[in-house]
Amino acid sequence: MSKFDRTREPEPGAIRGYDFPTIESRRLNNGLQTLVARHGDLPVVTVRIVVDAGAGAEVAGEQGLATLTANALEGGTSRLDGSGLAWELERLGVQLDTWVTWDALHVGCTAVRDQLPAVLALLAEVVRTPAFPAGEVERLREEQLAELLQRRVEPRALADDMAAQFIFPDSNPYARPLLGRRESVTALDPAAVARFHASHFAPRHTAVVMTGAISAEEAHRLVERSFGGWQAKPAAGAVPAAAAPATGAVIHLVDRPGAVQSELRLGHVGLARDHQDYYPVLVMNAVLGGTFTSRLNLSLRERHGFTYGVRSAFAFRRHPGPFVIQTAVGTDVTVRAAREALNEIDALLEQGPTEQEVATARRFLAGVFPLQLQTTDQLAARLAELVTYDLPADYFAHYRDRITAVTRDDVLRAARAHVRPRELAIVVVGDAASLHQELADLDLAPVERHTINGHAA
Amino acid sequence: MIRIPVERFTLANGLRVVFSRDASAPAVAVNLWYNVGSRNERTGRTGFAHLFEHMMFQGSAHVPEMAHFALIEKAGGSLNGSTWLDRTNYYETLPAHYLELGLWLESDRLGWLLPAMTQEKLDNQRDVVKNERRWRVDNQPYGDWDERIQELMYPPDHPYHHSVIGSMADLDAASLEDVENFFRTYYAPNNAVLTLCGDFDPADARAQIERYFGEIPPGPPIPPIPGRSELPAHLGGEQRLTLEQDITLTRVYLAYRVPPFGDDGFYAALVASAVLATGRASLLYRTLLREQGLAQDVVAYAFPIVVGASMLVLWATARPHCTIDQLESALLRQVAALTEVSDADVERAIRMLEARQLIDLQTVDERADQLSMYTTLFDDPERVNTELSRVRAVTTAAVREFARAYLVPENRGVLRYVPRGGAA
């Protein structure tokens, strides 16, 4: 017997305040923006250089060029070859990362504070004067091609790529992998990389973000020293994504003969980052499939045992990105799982969420916000978001208030406006022989069969 | 370098508690390590420690089904658990004012789990775990690598011979009686470590821990790990396996038996792993990728495991034109080169390991997990502060000596994946 009443959950203590760190933002004379925020009590600083040169900036025929350019930045500078550059950074304990999203190219690292002046000078060299030696660019292009091959046999990546291909029309850049397609990547060469750099890397299109054990004064002084003399010409604007027409539901069955599990994706075109319903949609998605106790996970995992997990997400980009539900389910329960997911969507749209569900989702999103800002890198990612989506410096100071202001009515309206079950592309990557008939019998949508290379089969 | 504050005490029932205060954010991490993992599983019940971990989220006597996840998410916290060879951990990161909620939930499942267990819950979580196995292993290229490497590197009667996820047949065989026996055997305060890290008042927290955990009785002595834990320092002959899968790129894994985590010799293996594959100036990246263009990626990892012997495992994925034999030879050449490793290589590796640790310790969750780990494995939470001195003590001569002693053909396992049909 317990000595006190364990049946009641304990009341929370007094809430402690949380303030998003203060951001000091400045521009150099050449237009380069700097954002600095002091954070944490460890002697480390994250530096992240954000260039307006994401995959969305690629022109037709050069898909995959932003990724190749980001990777080729580590191929060396006009002063150091690739190996020399790696040595200079890593003898200081610094691991350089370069990557792209659809909306930006990132160059980043986290360094021990004392090394910062040397590290920032090296990063400036990487961004301003990369050499793109032919041997390195060609090697990295071959690795990119091999990775594309790899994605065809890795069922999760294959399902992601197929979902993008079937959600977006071919004219929309988001229809293909961030890495590009085999045909376009094969054609890339050192000259294309140098051209992409020359037309997109410019101070007016670049921001330097620094977070951690550093004062704004020191950060601005270091940035002035490393980037003040940069006079590259501003680039042309990014190419806008084509508007995506709505399509009717289709079941796309991608055959992996003998697969013991089906990777399932249900998706349609979602919203851009600047959509006015951003916050209602965040809360709505948490209720539908964004948390462990979401409707989808409670149903597909905890009630039916179909899957290890299921989640839904909106990818908010400059242009409307995808809304996707993703899970992996046993081959024998694939069709039941797809139907359950659709039932959950229908129920949410018809009856709406309960007040309690909305309250839980709001409290979850507001509560984990500071928990996910513990590291200098997490904070730098938020600052980069301000740059890429042109948000005001005090934007995140109001984040939790905006979450908390979302009502049940907002969520219901957002669900009905932005989740459209009749338009979902349903992608099943699995054993077609055992699945085809059952999927056809669903009588939900026509079934189209494909090979892992995306061809009709 | 930094110093993480560490305070510890033990309850009368044997529960070891570690506190580390850090008020820089209004967050607190509650982290429990149970000194039980797949190594403790009996024959015919592989995968059970992990299946049991899932059952710990299914409610307990005073916590309704699904309430564990629901209450923490409603509080604005995150949570999970994981099972590995040596241990099972459970953790939540909470807004600081919800600390007591975490203590209530954790104490209830440690003290009062069994009344809430049902066949229906077990059957449901068995299905979930079988799907987890399909997702991680059976439906994933190279997904069975760790299972295969463990089979190659540890004899059948060693507790590391079988994988954490276990076999489908053994998962099918698991019963409610197994849940009860496992709980009574291993889930006791004297077999656990509780760590709090973050923004909390130590006196209040201590009183709450006494209140929530103090009345849970200690369990009987923990039975010894089944099978034969002792191992010779060397494998005693190369072990090889080639597998065909639906892949396009071949991959080679090399594994070497090395001293267990915590031994002085382990740190030479750790530094060797960073020399080999951490960063783009690493030995394998600069040769296999940059100079020779043979590989697509390289990884090296020294397992932090403690029973008998650990492993240094490295792998490389081939570019399409590179054959499996070319890849294996290229890897072996670089491993051999470690016997002549340079001062610069070793210094770079140590700087990378130091920075990594500093970066990792930024979150209260990671600090708490490391404190629980060092307390569970070595009864010494202070190792969170002293571990790097063991890394820094590794000299060039020590890495060369390690390579000569351990990175030899008769001490290695070789696992090769080739496309079905033997194209490579």
Image (cartoon, coloured by chain):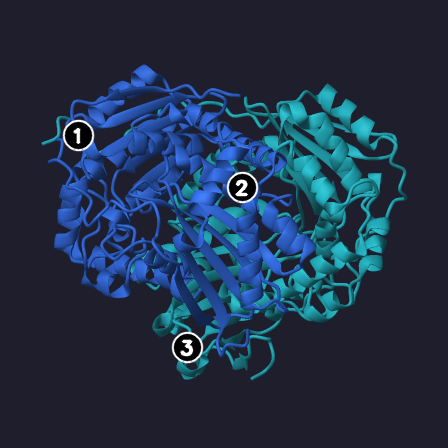
At label 2, the amino acid type is Ala
Label placed on residue A5: 1
Does residue A97 lie above or below B2 as drawn?
A: below
Residue A416: image location, x then y, percent: 52, 58
- Given the current orientation, which residue lies at the most extreme top position? B203
At label 1, the amino acid type is Asp
Residue behind mark 3: A258
How many residues crowd around disc 2 within 10 Å: few (fewer than 14), some, or many (20 or more)?
many
When asked about the image quadrant of residue B368, the answer is top left
A92 vs B180, left or right, is right
Q: Kindly identify the residue that appears in the image at 58 percent across and 28 percent down.
A: A20
When asked about the image quadrant of residue B99, the answer is top left
* Chain B shade: blue
Q: Kindly identify the residue that appears in the image at 13 percent across and 26 percent down.
A: A3
**Front position in the image: B396 or A259:** B396
Does residue B253 lie above or below B283 as drawn?
A: below
Q: Kindly identify the residue that appears in the image at 65 percent across and 49 percent down.
A: B286
Distance between the alpha carbons at the discs numbered 3 and 1: 53 Å
**Front position in the image: A67 or B212:** A67
Task: Assess whether mark 1 and mark 3 are in contact (beta carbons under 8 angstroms).
Answer: no
